[in-house]
Amino acid sequence: MLAIPVAPAVALADYQRRAEDFWQVEVTAQYRAQAGLTAGAELASVYEAHADLFSIDVAQELIDMARSLPDRDYLCLAAFAAMRYLRQVALPCDEAFWEQLGKAMLPWQGGALPFFATTGLLATESDPALRRLLYQERGACVSENNHTLLERWRHIDAAVGLLGYETYYALCDELRGLRLESLELMAQTFLRETAVPYFRALSYWGQMMLGTSQPDAADMFYLLRGHQFDALFPADQLETAVYKTVRQLGFPLGSAAGFAAGLEIDLEPRQGKSPRPFCAFIHVPDEIKLVINPVGGHQDYKAVFHELGHALHGLHISAHLPFTARYLGDDSVGEAFAFVFEQLPTNPFWLKGVLGTFNDSTYVDYMRFTRLLFARRCAAKVLYENQLHLGLSDPAQFYTAVLQEHLGLNISPAYYLLDVDDGFYNAQYFRAWMLAAQITVWLEAQLGREWVCSASTGALLKTLWQRGQPPAEVVSTLVGQRNLNPEALIRSFVA
């Protein structure tokens, strides 16, 4: 007797339509709050109004479908529902924690300093003794509020159990397709192969910019700000540099009067604007917001071009793809394109072609060091976060030890939870670093080292962008690699 297939209770087309509606409301609220246009995102009411989309029953059903049906859409939707369910569980603690930090005032030079002002001050304070004192006060403030983050993760871990997983590690590994065990081996390889050039560069740049070959963790905000190079990147040329780059890469988008239908670039300083640059995909591919709160100099160029990589990717995703392909999928892919574009202002060919008279190789070497530091930090955090979510008796001590070993910096244990993003996003960043290096090798093989100023580059990238965010492994094979691996990334630093 033939078995009669049972239709799934969650109708795929209807669920995607309603999920896209929710996405647009959620991301719009986040965008307006982070852009300083409203006082807050008020996400609790947004989640409450759409709670049936990611109730525990719906999340479990989508997980079951993803396991039984050979359809990647179900896997993407299972991840979407499960992660939104967990975010809703964590929301009260999130709001409490950030409210605590928002109200926190640190004693400083006879007065009081808001917690969120400390990052900017650490980047501008030239006195190393004051930097260390401020870093200590900042860490103490975070440590006093870590109990809220601990409670947050207890709630998440309990909810993970209700979804049928033993650990948060197991949930994210399956639903996000991160292959965390093999990724840890790749991270170890990358850290081992780049250790010598990294520690040599850390000593060199510490001596050059700080007067010490052994920088303190408190010094890194100032070192990474790189004020010495600001004059090379005039603020009044930033928008022009964006338009010129887009045109040189073969996109019929840029003009002095505007950019592209669907893309809004917000570079205006604004009270309440997030210090963290971001790109909001409100409606793909028709409404995308690129937002930075400028601090000046080369940091603004780096931030804008990173977000430009996201924005151009979003603008060229096919409008005919379903919700899952236009918004969800492997975030490693979107971050890889952002990393490719982030590195444009550090490329000698771009610097000459766009800024004209630039011929200072010191800046190129400096930025190569900062990229290596950030890539190693991602790799080291892969080691830490894997163990954190598998269970550690003393995660704060392990966090400090891992970063000390691989970065050579005495980073405070106070940040062992604040330095953890949901959904193993750091792991996706490390995957993105590897994929970005492979994409760059592919572009150079097709167009030479001058690809950064070639009108043919856009056409090549569009062939990848139109697919949305398929697994990074798929994109890796499309650019001629055997699979996602750290070999190209290692070669970019060890030449």
Image (cartoon, rainbow, N blue to C red):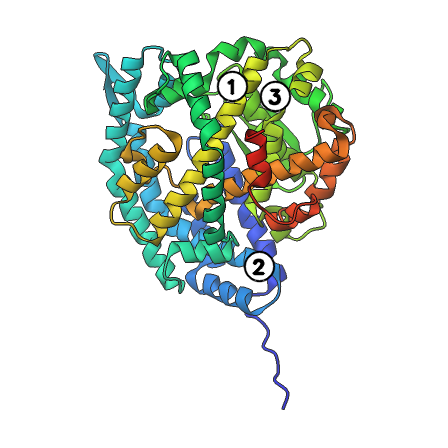
Q: Quadrant of the C terminus?
A: top right
Mark 3 residue crowding within 10 angstroms, few (<14) / some (14–19) / many (20+): many
Q: CA distance from mark 2 to mark 3?
A: 42 Å
Asked if residue 165 lies left or right of residue 335, the reply is left
The residue lying toward the viewer, choosing from 50 and 480, is 480
On the image, the x and y values in percent for residue 75 come to 55, 59
Residue 258 vs 489, above or below: the answer is above
Judging by the rendered image, the residue that carries numbered circle 3 is 345
267 relative position to 143: left or right: right
C-beta proximity under 8 Å, tags 2 and 3: no
What is the quadrant of residue 454 in the picture? top right
Residue at left offset 77%, top offset 36%: 459
Tell me the residue at 71%/32% (across/down).
444
Label ID, residue 366: 1
Position of residue 235 relative to residue 313, above or below, is above
Q: Amino acid at mark 1?
A: Tyr
Residue sticking out furthest to the bottom: 1
Element carrying mark 1:
helix
Q: Whole-percent x and y of residue 491?
A: 58, 34
Q: Amino acid at mark 2?
A: Tyr
Tag 2 secondary structure: helix
Q: Earlier in the sequence, mark 2 or mark 3?
A: 2
Q: Residue 87: x, y in percent?
A: 41, 49
Where disc 3 sits, the SS reads helix
Residue 361 appearing in the image: yes
The residue tagged 2 is: 15
Q: Which percent across, then down, holds residue 93?
A: 31, 44
Image point 59% across, 74% down: which residue? 7
Q: Distance from label 3 to label 1 (Cα)?
A: 12 Å
Label 1 Cα neighbours within 10 Å, binned few <14 / some 14-19 / many ≥20: some
The residues tagged by marks 2 and 1 sit, at their Cα atoms, a distance apart of 48 Å
